[in-house]
């Protein structure tokens, strides 16, 4: 990006009051909030919003600030894509708290997958910039292909998380890209004039002969088509994991691209595997990975908050590589929720195999919420533990 003035300029005092917005049911903490200065800047930079039904699309809204802000400025029938299911639920909860959708009336927004139904005919696309360039590339190409030729894209982020490479990614799909002045440590990228001949290149696939797996991934999935170090440690441990009989399920919790779920199904031909993640990009990728490895008939992929769809005591084996960030913030709350879910779903004597960054020292939490925990493997960076349900 071109160097711009100091990003600590004055706030726009005409911006809406979002003090009523909550993150619930997402992870909440004093250092986490439901909106930031980027939401306000995106709406201000967008200018007057088109008001015809479906003209405005919102992508990456965390807990509803962008969507509800657009609605408050006259947008109707806003089409929304939120990768996380908890974000979707937070938007609905915040809208309901404001009195929207009551008495059977239609909500002024609708949720869509990341594809044609979301973007067809869109005139204005408001985006909370992802930190991943791959995610941005997938979004940009889909907007260029499916939105109107005169579409405007207004994509904002925190300055510390933005890079000049974001301009380059947008410029691959749009002829005109420029940055706004910064305000309150946020900045916006404007893009317009979709290029001819743009072809969506997602999902992508990669064959890993060393582990006998093909990985398929959308742009928003952690590690993409590669296999991260922690996941590789879990793959190495599969032969040591407790045998499960064909009447029970193994669970790949927070499955990402579905690498572990596919590997478990390949290693044990009678095994049924539940792969679950709250991310839309993850579940789409995991389903495609299972199909690419010929185990789609034995891997059930579900988008859910943890293991909310699984019954108590219904699994003998849960495998987990938990996230340790909530957005851009280091926070262990999500991992602790997943540990608790695993403890609920495991039958007595069942095992949770978990890999985590050693500095996070999760073992006392695992002991408390699951059961006796031993170390299976340790490297300079990662620890693999086995927790047995009491």
Image (cartoon, helix red, strand yellow):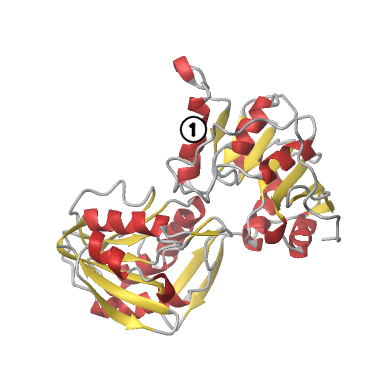
Give the position of the C terminus as an image quadrant.
Answer: bottom left
Residue 113 image position (x, y, % from top left): 54, 44
Instruction: Provide the residue designation for mark 1.
Output: 92
Residue 242 image position (x, y, % from top left): 20, 73
The residue under the point 47% across, 57% down is 282
Q: In the depicted view, which residue is nearer to us: 134 or 15?
A: 15
Q: In the depicted view, which residue is nearer to us: 362 or 8?
A: 8
Q: In the depicted view, which residue is nearer to us: 315 or 322?
A: 322
Residue 261 image position (x, y, % from top left): 35, 65
Image side of residue 45 versus residue 336, left or right = right
Q: Is residue 110 visible?
A: yes
The residue under the point 17% across, 54% down is 313
Residue 184 image position (x, y, % from top left): 74, 48
Q: Residues within 10 Å of mark 1 (few under 14, many from 20)?
A: many
Q: Classify 216 as above or below 61.
A: below
Q: Classify 46 as above or below 378.
A: above
The residue under the point 51% across, 32% down is 94
The residue under the point 53% across, 68% down is 223
């Amino acid at each position: 990006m071109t160097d711009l003035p100091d990003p600590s300029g004055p706030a726009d005092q005409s911006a809406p009051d979002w003090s009523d917005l909550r993150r619930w049911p997402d992870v909440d903490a004093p250092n986490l909030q439901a909106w930031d200065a980027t939401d306000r800047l995106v709406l201000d930079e967008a200018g007057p919003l088109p008001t015809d039904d479906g003209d405005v699309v919102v992508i990456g809204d965390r807990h509803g600030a962008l969507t509800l802000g657009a609605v408050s400025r006259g947008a109707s029938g806003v089409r929304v894509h939120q990768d996380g299911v908890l974000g979707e639920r937070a938007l609905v909860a915040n809208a309901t708290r404001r009195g929207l959708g009551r008495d059977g009336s239609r909500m002024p927004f609708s949720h869509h997958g990341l594809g044609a139904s979301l973007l067809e005919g869109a005139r204005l696309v408001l985006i909370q910039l992802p930190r991943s360039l791959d995610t941005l590339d997938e979004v940009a190409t889909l907007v260029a292909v499916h939105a109107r030729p005169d579409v405007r894209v207004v994509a904002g982020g925190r300055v510390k998380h933005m890079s000049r490479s974001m301009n380059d990614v947008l410029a691959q799909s749009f002829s005109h890209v420029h940055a706004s002045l910064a305000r309150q440590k946020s900045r916006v990228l404007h893009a317009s004039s979709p290029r001819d001949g743009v072809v969506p290149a997602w999902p992508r696939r990669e064959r890993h002969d060393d582990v006998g797996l093909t990985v398929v991934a959308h742009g928003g999935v952690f590690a993409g088509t590669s296999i991260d170090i922690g996941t590789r440690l879990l793959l190495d441990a599969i032969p040591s994991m407790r045998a499960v009989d064909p009447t029970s399920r193994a669970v790949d919790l927070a499955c990402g691209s579905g690498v572990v779920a596919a590997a478990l199904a390949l290693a044990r031909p009678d095994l049924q595997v539940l792969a679950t993640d709250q991310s839309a990009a993850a579940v789409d990728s995991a389903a495609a990975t299972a199909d690419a490895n010929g185990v789609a008939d034995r891997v059930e992929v579900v988008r859910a908050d943890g293991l909310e769809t699984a019954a108590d005591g219904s699994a003998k084996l849960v495998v987990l590589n938990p996230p340790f960030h909530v957005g851009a913030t280091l926070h262990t709350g999500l991992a602790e929720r997943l540990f608790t879910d695993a403890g609920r779903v495991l039958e007595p004597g069942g095992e949770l195999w978990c890999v985590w960054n050693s500095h996070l020292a999760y073992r006392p939490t695992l002991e408390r919420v699951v059961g006796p925990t031993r170390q299976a493997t340790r490297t300079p960076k990662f620890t693999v533990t086995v927790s047995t349900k009491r």
